[in-house]
Amino acid sequence: MKKKKKDLTSRAFSKGYQASIQGKPLSACPHTVNSNMAYHWARGWREGREDFWSGFKQQAFQQKVINL
């Protein structure tokens, strides 16, 4: 059975979320050419930072990334 590919914008969002958890800065966005992808990456990064500052634990981060 073939796997269905994820939407590229949702993938960018989840990668940005993961980058924020790892402590990478917002300027580390890999999408400089495509502004739409950069927008979704930054949106994920901001949500990850917000969750980090709210006191999420590592297990909650992992569960959220799986659900993305």
Image (tube, grey):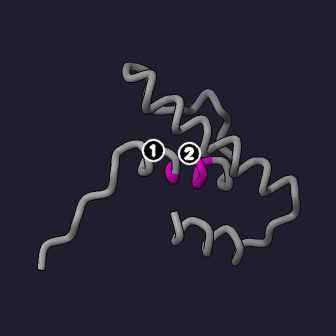
Residue at 67 percent across and 36 percent down: it is 25
Q: Are marks 2 and 1 in contact (CB under 8 Å)?
A: yes
Residue indicated by mark 1: 12
Camera-nearest residue between 26 and 46: 46
Please identify the quarter of the rendering in which residue 8 is found. Answer: top left
Q: Which kind of residue does numbered mark 2 sit on?
A: Gly
Residue 33 in the image: above or below residue 30: above
Q: Which mark is residue 16?
A: 2
Number of on-image labels: 2
Residue 16 in the image: above or below residue 42: below
Q: Which kind of residue does numbered mark 1 sit on?
A: Ala
Q: Does the magenta stretch include residue 41?
A: no
- Where residue 59 sits in the image (x, y, percent)? 70, 77
Q: Is the magenta stretch mostly helix, strand or loop?
A: helix
Residue at 13 percent across and 73 percent down: it is 2
Residue 1 in the image: above or below residue 65: below
**In the rendered structure, which segment of residues is drawn in magenta?**
14-19
Question: How would you rate the neighbour count of disc 1 (Cα within 10 Å): few for under 14, some for 14-19, many for 20 or more?
Answer: many
- Where residue 28 sits in the image (x, y, percent)? 57, 32
